Image: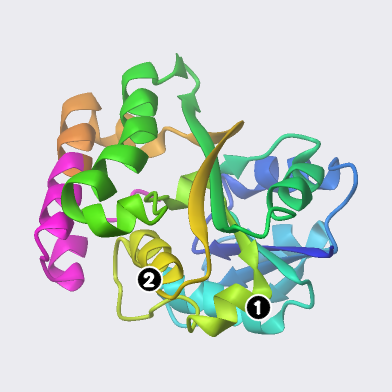
Amino acid sequence: MAVSIIIPTLNEAEALPDTLAALAHLSPPPFEVIVADAASDDSTVALARQSNAQVLPNLAKGRAGQMNAGASTASGDILCFLHADTVVPPDFVAQVEQILSDPETALAGFISIMRGPSGVRRVTTAHNFIKTWYAPLLFRPISFFRGCRLLFGDQVMVCRRADFETIGGWDPEQAIMEEADLCLRMVRGGRGRVRQVPRKVWSSDRRVAEWGFWRANLTYLYVGLMWGFGANPTRLAEHYEDVR
């Protein structure tokens, strides 16, 4: 199976080098790495090109649309959507191939460990782990019992191209919680179950570092609750400003 890794970026010059360095040491390597950039005005594009990634420059801002553009360009039969501040383990490609060898699994994500210069954010990491389970159980119980778990971008989301295209890809109208929307549509579309697999990836704690523990975690909780009750994604995004 050929694995295409797609990274949506906007001014990620600080975080991107670690992510790309990890990708350069994957064994086996991915089929391709595509950086879908929303007209960054820092050195993001230059750094991506130096790493020999394929760059899609000057895309419209919006992570869902950027990832759709990357998927449209990709040649692999497995699509991996990776945040620019997330580092994957050296055997990542082999893990992905093994996970998606199960025909009942349509979409999968990993356990995201949130860390920074001061160490691991254990409470936030634990909450992120359990909300993958409790959010769909509380708010979308029918989908939960059909096999849906709610994944988020820092968990690294992987799926087959065929399943992704069948459900129409990412919804560009989802300004936030686009990952939850994709998970639900995979299950409701009959493509298979959504899994959180027991393997780790490591993501930046930059939002917690910028906002502080309480503000960050209360914002995560508020956005999740309001999404669960059907709030407009565009309005929710107003509470989730960029920290780059």
Left or right position of 133 against 83: left
Q: Give 114 or 10, whichever is nearer the viewer.
A: 114
Residue 56: image location, x then y, percent: 66, 78
Query: On screen, 32 above or below 131?
Result: below
Q: Residue at left 51%, top 47%?
A: 195
Image side of residue 207 versus residue 225, left or right:
right
Q: How is the image coloured?
A: rainbow
Q: Residue at x 23, y 28 (%)?
A: 212
Badge 1: few (under 14), some or many (20 or more) residues near its Cα, within 10 Å?
few
Work out whether mark 2 precedes mark 1 in sequence or the reverse, and give the earlier one.
Answer: 1
Picture residue at 66% right of the left edge, 74% below the top? 161
Return the x and y of residue 146 as percentages of the image width and height. 38, 57
Residue furthest to the right: 28
**Numbered tag placed on residue 162 in the rendering:** 1
Q: Quadrant of residue 19?
A: top right
Q: Which segment did they paint magenta?
A: 221-244
Asked whether the beta carbons under mark 2 and mark 1 sit within 8 Å of each other, the answer is no
Q: Label 2's element?
A: helix
Residue 81 belongs to magenta span:
no
- Numbered badge on residue 188: 2
Q: Residues within 10 Å of mark 2 (few under 14, many from 20)?
A: some
Q: Where does the image place residue 187, in percent across and percent down from the top left?
A: 42, 65
Q: Which of the pair 18/232 is nearer the observer?
A: 232
Query: At 78% from the left edge and 72% from the top edge, which residue is drawn?
Result: 76
Q: Is residue 49 above or below residue 228?
A: below
User: Type of residue at label 1?
Assistant: Ala
Q: Is residue 224 left or right of residue 184?
A: left
Total marks in image? 2
Disc 2 residue type (three-letter): Arg
Q: Is residue 227 magenta?
A: yes
